[in-house]
Structures are given as structure tokens and as C-alpha cells.
Image (cartoon, grey):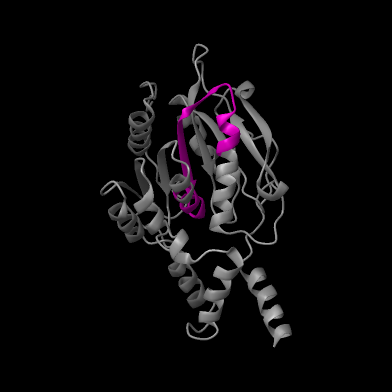
Amino acid sequence: MNLLKALAHRALLWGLRAPHLAHPVMPEGLALPPEQVRPVWIEGEGGSRLFGWFIAPPGSHGLPAPGAVLMHGWGAHAGLMLPAAPWLHEAGLALLVLDARGHGLSSEVDFQSLPRFAQDVESGLAWLRQQPEVDASRLALIGHSVGAGAVLLSATRQPDVRAVISLSAFAHPAEVMQRWLAQMRIPARWPGRWILSHVQEVIGARFDEIAPLRSAGAVACPVLFVHGQDDETVPFSDALRLSEASGSGPAACLPVPGGHDLTQGLRPDHVQRMVAFLRSSLMLAPTYRSS
């Protein structure tokens, strides 16, 4: 029986592994001054090394600028968050765009999870606070999918975070796992129940404890939920549920045309809405131009 459980454990980790997509050390074609973009290596949890790009803020006359950590989703990497960098930079932010462990150029791990994504976000926050270009009292978190769940969880533990933008977050990991079981045609009762129980044992947390629904209710700072109206990976209704669960009353929810990725659906008015949200939360000067 022990051998059977060990084999099942290995098979489960293999089945749930994140695809590993590499990217170049320096981004290409980014609409930013090259001298303001530099690759960085950050010490992460358990001696791991996290790769990221630090994008210094635009000219601030020697004054520290607000900062933001950007975290990608499952099986992605920092490069897939870079389309947001130019307008965030233009809005006046310093940016740290990270690879989570087991993704991109960061350290390999035996498994990844939402709690580990959150640890990586918090390692990035700790590093960002130490940068002389950054005002550590005005920090935001921006995440996509699992990364969105991670920034919500981190915000519950980091009281100095002033704003969160959640992109395509799911409401509850148990629901995500149940959809995965159905996709893999694994019966829900057995071995489905064992799988759900074992995954929680492996990651060291119960799904209810780390669920974005729970985090949304515990986050004290303003949150903006951005979600594709035709998202087939995570239904748009999850964004509405998260918005309603917000601890400070119903949070803003921004519907975007398209699916889970969001890149193709974002229009200038959506970008303006997100910038206005950050400007209000972080006291940013009105520098963004939609043209």
C-alpha cells in the first residue's frame, strides 16, 4: 500500500506540474528606455533564486516613486506580464516583474502551489522595499490567474500594500481542482476525494484557507478585479463572487472582452480605468496618456 501511495503521489505531481517556458534574460521590443530595465536575481524562500526584471520609474526629480510587483500565472513567466509594463511605467511606477519558482529562469522546485507563488511575491516585495528609487509606503500588487490568487493572499499578510489588481483570478482552488478532475475524467468520489485531500497535504494548507474568496474578504486595501467576459478557464462569475466578497464592501469589477489571457481584450479605456484605480490608491500624478 505504501508503494502504491508513493507511485500515486509521483503521478499526481507529474500530472499537476507546470509547463516550463523559458525566456531571454533581457526582453526585446519593450517600449521602455533600455537603460531603465535591468535583470535582477532575488533571494527567495528556502535559499531559492528568483529572476525578475526591475524597471526603474520615469524621472521623479530624485523622489522615490510608488512600486508594484507583477506575478504571472501557472505555467507562464515574467515575460508574459511585460505588455502591462509600458503603461504602468508611464503612470509613474517602479516595477518588479518576477518569475515564480519553477517558472522562467527562477529556481526549480519539486512542486509549485498558490502559497508558494505568494511567498515569491513577498520575496519580491521585500526586495522592492529596499530599492532607493521606490517609496516603500506606496506599493501595489498585480497578478494573473494563480498569480492573482497569490497577490490577494500576500495582501492579507502585508499590511503596507496599498492596492491590488487581480487579473482573471479564480474563486476557490477546490473548484479549479474539480474542473481538472472532470477534464481528466477522474471520478469525483474515488480517487477524486483522495487527490483533493493529498494535494492539500502536499502544499501544507487547506483550500479554504488559501482560497481567493477568503483572501478577498481579508484584504484591507482597495482591490480591482479584471476578468474576461468569455473566459473558458475561469468563469467570469468568479470575478463577481470575489468582488462581492471584498472585505471593505463590494470591490470594483472590470469586465474585459475576451478570455483568460486578457491581452487582446484590453482597450485604452480599460487601461485608463486601471491607471485611475492605481492613481487613487497610490496618490499617483496624472501622467498617463491614452494616445
172 up-or-down from 277: above or below? below
Q: Which residues are magenta?
A: 125-152
Name the image quarter holding residue 204. bottom right
Locate the N terminus by quadrant: bottom right
In this view, the residue in front, 209 or 86, is 209
Total numbered labels: 0
The answer to whether residue 217 shows anywhere in this view is yes
**66 sits left or right of 241 in the view:** right
Please name the residue shown 48% across and 85% down the image: 189
Q: Position of residue 232 (x, y in %)?
A: 42, 62
Q: Position of residue 282 (x, y in %)?
A: 39, 29
Q: Position of residue 209 (x, y in %)?
A: 45, 61
Please name the residue shown 71% across and 84% down the image: 2
Looking at this rendering, what residue extends furthest in the left direction?
249
**Residue 135 located within the stretch drawn in magenta:** yes
In this view, the residue in front, 223 or 160, is 160
Please name the residue shown 58% across and 70% down the image: 201
Locate the C terminus by quadrant: top left
**Residue 162 located within the stretch drawn in magenta:** no
Looking at this rendering, what residue extends furthest in the top direction?
61
Q: Position of residue 102 (x, y in %)?
A: 67, 54
267 up-or-down from 104: above or below? above
The answer to whether residue 258 shows anywhere in this view is no
**169 sits left or right of 123 in the view:** left
Looking at this rendering, what residue extends furthest in the bottom direction?
1
